[in-house]
Image (tube, rainbow, N blue to C red):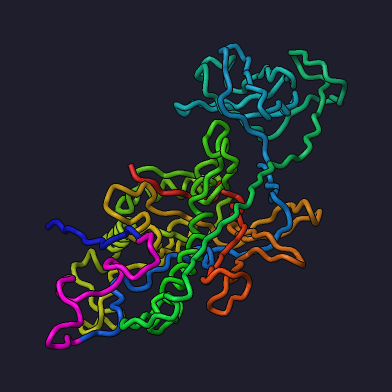
Amino acid sequence: MAINPTFGSIVPSQSQQLLQTNYLQFNNGTSDFAQQYLPEIYEQEVERYGNRTLSGFLRMVGAEMPMTSDQVIWSEQNRLHVAYDGCTNDNANNIGITVGAGVVNVISPGQTIVLMDALGVELKAVVTSSNPTTGALVVAPYTAANTAALADTGIKIFVYGSEFNKGSQTTNWDGSAGAITGTTNISIDPTFTQFSNSPIIIRSNYSINGSDMSQIGWVEVATEDGTSGYLWYLKAESETRLRFEDYLEMSVVEGELAAAASAALAGGFKGTQGLFAAIEARGNVETAFSGANLTDFDNILKNLDTQGAIEENMLFLDRTTSLEIDDMLAGISAGAQGGTAYGLFENSEEMALNLGFSGFRRGSYDFYKTDWKYLNDASTRGATTGISSIEGVLVPAGTSTVYDQILGTNIRRPFLHVRYRASQTEDRRMKSWLTGSAGGAFTSSLDAMDINFLSERCLVVQAANNFVLFKGA
C-alpha cells in the first residue's frame, strides 16, 4: 500500500505583515467580522508539526570550546608500524615503493617483510637492499627463489621484524645487493598529520516597526521556547531565534570548504568543513548500506578493526535505515524465530511489545542507535524517499588525544566538538542585541525594533577515520 505524504508548506513568507498565509480567516477569506453570527474561535494555534527545532545532535555527541584565532589546527598521530600499498614487482626480487607526496622509504636492509597481492598470494622475505630515494627494494624470499608468484602491481608490504647475519654491524648506507654483512638501520622519526578548519560567521535578523508591535491579534501564539501572548511579532521573533539556533548546528554539519576554482572563493567566501564533508574527505563512506543485511554491517566492523577499533559507537540514522536495523535484529533474535514474543517482561501478552532496539553488540563493538530528526524532517533531508543522499552517520564515543599547538602538550578532546570565537572582551558563541527605538531599544531614531543574531564557529572532527557516513545508492 502506497502512502502520499503531506508535508505542508515549507516556503516561508518574505513579509513581516499579517497575511492570509500566516493569519487565520473565516470561510476561506470570503467573510469578515461584519456577519450576523460570531463563529466559535480557537484562540491557540494547533502545533501540527510538534517540536519543529532540529538542533540537539552536537549537544549529544560533542562539546563547545572557545578559541581566539581565525583558524584551529590540530595534529593526529600516524600509524605505528611501517606498511606500503600499491607497490610494484618485477618477478625477480625487485620491489618498488612509490615515493613522493609525503611517502618516503624507511625500510632498512635486514628487515623482514610480508608481501601480499589482491589475489591472496603472499611471500615472506628479508630485505637485502633498500634505496631511500627511489624506493627500490631488493628482497630474498624465504620460500621461493623469486617473487614471480606475486602480481606485478598492487602489492602490499609491511615490516614484521628483522634478521641479521652473525657478526654484522651497522655501517654506512651503501644500497648494495647480496648477503648482508653490514647494514644501515634507518632511524624513523615519528611524524604527525596536521588538520585545520576555519570558523564562519553566521548571522540573522528580525525587524518589526513600532506600530505592528502594538497591534493585538486574536490568535494566542505559543512557541517551542515558551513565548506566548496575543502579539504576533512575538511568534516571528521567537521563530527567528529558533531558526538561527538550528543554523548554528546545521552550518557545521553541512559546511563545505570553498574549492580553488569555486565561485564562492572568488566572492571572498572561504566556507568551513562540516561533519559530512570531513567524513567524506578523511573518514569512511558506506554506499548503498542496508540495515537489513547483516553482511553489510559486518563489513563495517571489519573496516573499524583496521582503524581505531573504538569499542563504543553511536548510530544516528534516518527512519528507513533505523527500521531496517530493527528488523534485522528482530529477525535474528530467538523470540522472533520462535514465532511469538509477548511483552517486555515476564512474557505477558497484555504488556506492550517493543519492536525497536536502542542498542546492540556485534563482535567486540557496542552500538547505541537513535533516530536523527535532521534526516527525517520534511524541511531538511527527510522530504521524500530517494532525495536525501545521507542515511546516517556512525560517531565514536569518548575522547581522543591530540597535540595542542597553543598549549604545547597533548590534550584530550571529544572526537566531535565545536570551536567558537571568544576572548575576554568578545564572546561570539551566540550574540544577540537590539537596535532601533521600539521594544525597549533606544539606539537610533528608526521607528522599529531590529533583533540581531551572530555567531562565529566551526566544527572539529578529530580522528575522522573512525567515523562512518552512510549514503544512498
Q: Is residue 173 above or below residue 298?
A: above
Q: Is residue 332 visible from the viewing direction of this image?
A: no
Q: Is residue 81 visible from the viewing direction of this image?
A: yes
Closer-to-camera residue (335/445): 445
Q: Position of residue 96 (x, y in %)?
A: 63, 18
Q: What number of labels is visible?
A: 0
Q: In which quarter of the image is residue 8?
A: bottom left
Q: Where is residue 265 in the image (x, y as percent from the top left)?
A: 57, 38
- Quadrant in which the N terminus appears: bottom left
For image coordinates 28% across by 69% down, the residue present is 355
Closer-to-camera residue (174/286): 286
| Magenta-drawn stretch contains 140 | no
99 vs 327, left or right, is: right
For image coordinates 77% across by 51% down, the residue present is 405
Q: Residue pushed farthest front? A: 445
Q: What stretch is highlighted in magenta?
A: 13-40
Q: In this view, does 134 lie above or below 230?
A: above
| Magenta-drawn stretch contains 15 | yes
145 vs 276, left or right, is: right
